[in-house]
Image: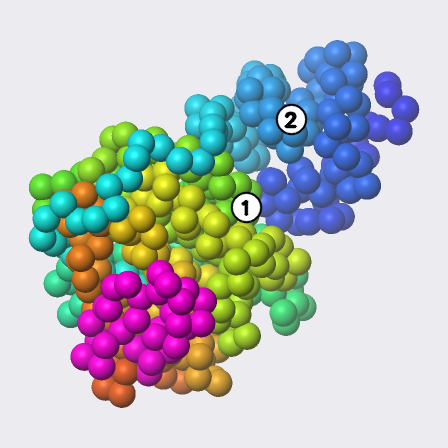
Amino acid sequence: MVRGYTPRVLTLLATAALAGSAVGDALAAFEGMSAEEMHDRMSVQTAFAPDDAAAWWTLGWAAYQLRDFTGAVEAWDEVAALDPSWRGLDFWRDAAAVRVALNPGPVGGPPVVTSPDGPAVLTVAAGGDTMLGNSLKNRVAPGNGEGLLEAVVEPLSSADLAFVNVESAISDDLPSTKCGPQSTSCYAFRTPSRYTAALVGAGVDVVSHANNHAMDLGEVGMLSTAAALDAAGIAHAGRYGDTAVLEVAGRTIAVVAAHSGECCLNVNDVNEVAAAVRAADAVADLVLFSFHGGAEGSRARRVPGRVEVAWGERRGDVRLLARHAVESGADLVIGHGPHVLRGMEVWQGRLIAYSLGNLVGYRQFGTKGGFTGTSAVLEVELASNGAVTGGRVHPLLLDEEAVPQEDPSGRAWKQLTELAGLDFPTTGVTVSEAGRLVLP
Ligand SMILES: [Zn+2]
């Protein structure tokens, strides 16, 4: 036995630190130890005790942290041979295998044609963070939540493609793995599966569930969300390798999604995101890149042009990320996560919306103070080559239950125009008094 380590010690450490997801438990076991050190220890341990599944599992995580994804797959293949029901094994072995295949190179791709190659051929409507009720707190809307999206049915359902970010795990019964029973500052969202009917009713075609609530019910919750969306006929982009591909108006559209956690393409890893966008671009006519990134709240309305941090987590340099995604083949970039509207710009002819704010957060999202209660559905018109030709902003105000209502005063128009001027003086997209996009 190697001094200072036994699988039992690892198990105890993990249990004490995080009664959460398999990845949380695995990484908790690293406390005070570098990935290199852990890799060395586990390499020795597995050589001496090749039937020690816990050691292989941890060796896999050490390799994963060192970006040796081939090594992670090999270690986790050993776990599979010893104990195929190991918790989280399939989820993370799949993620590692996808990351091997992505094989990131530098940012960029074939040259981008920056101007439209003709008139608009396609409209995309997009909304921001969407949380249709939380059964963990018994905050669920009547029926199937039909009333929650009433104000946005028209703009979403009349577009060729409608997208939102689903900011919760979808499940009827899985327990929360995230928050302690006494916690008051921890947010875990579990939306019952029947509320997918509200998304279908509003005309939503595709969603991102790569965000900081995707894993609120652990790995199994992320799979349950995907299964509920599949059952409802809604395409989704979530965990590693889960790129949505849809046929819309005679074109193939891929949706790639990233955020700041372990489950999914990471907003801090621009090379890997670029590789995923290039891979999507190779099979699709148009690529929509969705990111959940940037700091949160009323003081996070600006795009700072550097890495942002929220709740101790790096949430990306979203300007760098979005522009690199465009340079690598993305035709439309939709950001969300800050819970407020952020500015828009055009980069290489492609529209980047840095944050669409809260679309709905039924009795869970704070909307006091104005900025978090101001929202919009963005409608974008794209030419055949994906360059933006125009669009409009459908302004919304969230009520006290964080349900969107139409806003005839157009507060979103004013905010978006102001923010474009501040953050993107030469590339910014403003909004006219009639709600039309004014391109630079
Ligand atoms: Zn979020």
- Up-down: is 73 above or below 256? above
Which quarter of the image is occupied by the N terminus?
Answer: top right
The answer to the question of whether label 2 and label 1 lie on touching residues, with beta carbons closer than 8 A, is: no
Per the image, label 2 sits on a secondary structure element best described as: helix
For the residues marked 2 and 1, what is the alpha-carbon distance in whole angstroms?
A: 19 Å
Structural crowding at the residue carrying mark 2, measured as other residues with C-alpha within 10 Å and reported as few (<14), some (14–19) or many (≥20): many
* Residue 63, numbered label: 2
Which quarter of the image is occupied by the C terminus?
Answer: bottom left
- Up-down: is 12 above or below 208? above
- Up-down: is 425 above or below 77? below
Per the image, label 1 sits on a secondary structure element best described as: loop
Confirm whether residue 359 shows in the render: yes
Amino acid type at circle 1 is: Asn
Residue under the image location 44 percent in, 28 percent down: 102
Residue under the image location 80 percent in, 36 percent down: 33
Confirm whether residue 256 shows in the render: no
Horizontally, is 293 left or right of 242 in the view? Answer: right
From the top left corner, tell me how far across and down residue 210 is, in percent.
43, 49
* Residue 268, numbered label: 1
Nearest the viewer among 438 and 251 is: 438
Residues in magenta, as a range: 411-440
